[in-house]
């Protein structure tokens, strides 16, 4: 993937302090660059490059799109609760849409809804059909396909409009988005109950394309490795880790191999048990990094979610070509 643009929406049935009723976030190459929520009531920039590059009137137009989306998703959440006979309690409706620009020049689009973290309905760009995850979603699938225009509009958005916006955003932030920052790698070890736990942490890298593997001798031990996700830091870089269990007497056979576009060649890293001071520093860095990215992690969890909306007549579409924040919105009823 050369570049990616994704939007996440989340509607919540029971908002609370810090958890707004509605949230909309945009991500370029995995980096949050815009955010709207029902508490602030306005779409706001999260990066300097979008703040500097956006045209006059951009934020007002996109805020209006988000306001319409908030209204639509609130209705959709009510419909989903009715479908599953859940009138009370905390429930979430999520929608994740976007596109990836691949290295061969092709585009891969995605459009999916979730309810309470489970798949609800998605759009298969290849076939141009909606795919329902269960009987409740099947009602929505039939109505959307009977409409006859939604599949065409989403195909056009995912194949054309989304990539056009992606190229525009990459143009705004080209210097930042196309930079290459190699990872800072730290290896640590800890023995518990006769088992040696080896951890390999990679910090501060960009872009988020990276391979972190544990080697035993010259062989990659993939199935035996536990991996963390590639998580954004507050400074626009990323962090990840890989962990493996080993016999203490076989410690010297294990190496961590890291590959990243910012590295001239793969790096090989081993644990040095005598470097206790370094290990303490690594732990401190881990804690600090975790604190710094908490708000972004909330947005990332949000990334797994998003919603759609419904009017009583079956669907509602926000018209217009200005869809930088994705104005295509369909009702679920």
Image: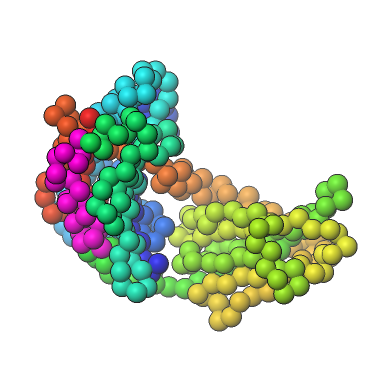
On the image, which quarter does residue 285 sit in? bottom right
Q: Quadrant of the C terminus?
A: top left
Where, quadrant-wise, is the N terminus in this rendering? bottom left
Magenta stretch, main secondary structure class: helix
> Is 58 included in the stretch rendered in magenta?
no
Residue 311 in the image: state x and y as whole percent. Answer: 17, 30
- The part of the image, by quadrant, that contains residue 170 is bottom left
In the rendered image, the vertical position of residue 324 relative to residue 250, given as above or below? above
Q: How many marks?
A: 0
Looking at the image, which is closer to me, 296 or 329? 329
- Residue at x 47% of width, y 59% of height: 235
Can you say whether 189 is above or below 262 in the image? above
Work out whether residue 126 can be spotted: yes
Viewer-nearest residue: 172 or 78:
78
Query: In the rendered image of this protein, does residue 72 appear above or below residue 240?
Result: above
Range of magenta residues:
143-163
Q: Looking at this rendering, what residue extends furthest in the left direction?
A: 320
Q: Position of residue 181 (x, y in %)?
A: 50, 71
x and y percent of residue 38 in the render?
A: 30, 34
User: Can residue 38 be seen here?
Assistant: no
């Amino acid at each position: 993937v050369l570049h990616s643009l994704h939007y996440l929406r989340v509607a919540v049935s029971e908002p609370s302090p810090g958890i707004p009723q509605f949230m909309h976030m945009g991500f370029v190459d995995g980096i949050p660059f815009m955010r709207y929520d029902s508490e602030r009531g306005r779409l706001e920039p999260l990066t300097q490059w979008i703040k500097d590059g956006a045209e006059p009137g951009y934020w007002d137009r996109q805020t209006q799109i988000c306001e319409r989306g908030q209204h639509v998703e609130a209705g959709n959440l009510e419909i989903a609760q009715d479908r599953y006979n859940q009138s009370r309690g905390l429930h979430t409706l999520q929608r994740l849409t976007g596109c990836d620009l691949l290295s061969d020049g092709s585009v891969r689009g995605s459009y999916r809804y979730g309810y309470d973290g489970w798949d609800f309905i998605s759009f298969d760009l290849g076939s141009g059909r909606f795919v329902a995850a269960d009987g409740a979603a099947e009602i929505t699938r039939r109505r959307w396909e009977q409409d006859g225009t939604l599949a065409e509009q989403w195909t056009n958005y995912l194949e054309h409009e989304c990539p056009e916006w992606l190229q525009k955003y990459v143009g705004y932030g080209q210097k930042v988005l196309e930079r290459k920052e190699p990872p800072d790698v730290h290896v640590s070890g800890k023995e518990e109950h006769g088992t040696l736990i080896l951890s390999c942490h990679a910090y501060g890298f960009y872009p988020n394309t990276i391979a972190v593997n544990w080697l035993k001798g010259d062989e990659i031990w993939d199935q035996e490795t536990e991996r963390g996700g590639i998580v954004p830091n507050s400074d626009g870089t990323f962090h990840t880790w890989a962990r493996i269990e080993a016999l203490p007497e076989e410690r010297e056979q294990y190496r961590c191999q890291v590959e990243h576009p910012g590295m001239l060649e793969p790096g090989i890293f081993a644990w040095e048990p005598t470097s206790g001071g370094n290990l303490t520093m690594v732990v401190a860095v881990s804690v600090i990094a975790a604190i710094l990215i908490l708000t972004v992690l909330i947005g990332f969890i949000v990334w797994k979610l998003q919603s759609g909306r419904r009017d009583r007549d079956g669907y509602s579409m926000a018209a217009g070509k200005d869809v930088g924040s994705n104005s295509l919105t369909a009702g679920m009823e």
